[in-house]
Image: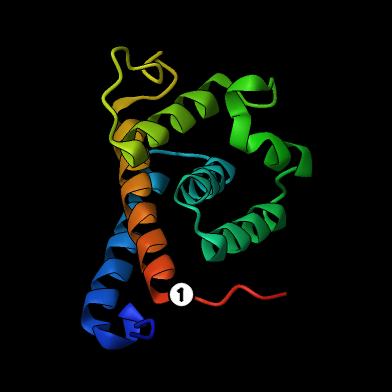
Amino acid sequence: MSSVNLGKQHPSVYQSLMKLDAEVRAALGAAEVDPLLVELVKIRVSQLNGCAFCLRMHTRDSLAKGEKADRLAVLAAWWESQYFTDQERAALALVEQVTSLAVPERRTWDDGSLDDAQVSAISWLATVMNAWNRVAITSHYPVAP
């Protein structure tokens, strides 16, 4: 069987995901989550899911917004570097928990760096980003130079 483009096969479902994505963006804005952190989260979720399409898109977006190449270079091992703030580290740990659905013994992200609105908005961002990754991977979106 050839790959199926999920968005083209069921456009109304795809549009619903786009609406959810817009609501999550609004929640992130209301929670005052830094736009660069939003991009870091999108990239990290995409790294965990192996979504080349989303990795390329959000890496380009983050660079356009002023992200530094050095921080992107170490994002896959963020806990090993000193490039990230406490809030960024908490957000990255949170999205790893949401993405892997592992229930760690200790919530390492819960250090007070994120308020309740930010925890909720970033959790929703990880949820919708996981959905986008699955759409792109399942649909075999092309990623060519």
Instruction: Please provide percent x and percent y for residue 144.
Output: 66, 75
Residue 125 versus residue 13 in the image, above or below: above
Q: Nearer the viewer, residue 92 or 140?
A: 140
Report the residue that reaches farthest toward the front: 1
Q: Taking 128 as reference, is 53 left or right?
A: right
**Percent coordinates x, y for residue 138 in the rendering:** 37, 70
Residue pictured at 69% horizontal, 20% vertical: 82
Q: Amino acid at mark 1?
A: His
Mark 1: give few (<14), some (14-19) or many (20+) Cα within 10 Å: some
The spot of residue 23 in percent (x, y) is 30, 58
Quarter occupied by residue 136 = bottom left
Q: Is residue 103 above or below residue 10?
A: above
What residue lies at 72% left-to-right and 49% top-to-bottom? Answer: 66
The number of callouts visible is 1
- Residue 42's place in the image compared with 4, above or below, is above
Q: Quadrant of residue 120?
A: top left
The quadrant in which the N terminus is found is: bottom left
- Colouring mode (rainbow / by chain / secondary structure / one colour): rainbow
Q: In the rendered image, which quarter contains the C terminus?
A: bottom right
Of residues 80 and 22, the one nearer the viewer is 80
Quickly name the residue at label 1: 140
Q: Is residue 139 above or below residue 9?
A: above
Q: Looking at the image, which residue is at 22% across and 76% down?
A: 13
Q: Residue at x 55, y 77 (%)?
A: 142
| Element assignment for label 1 | loop
Percent x, y for residue 91?
Answer: 45, 31
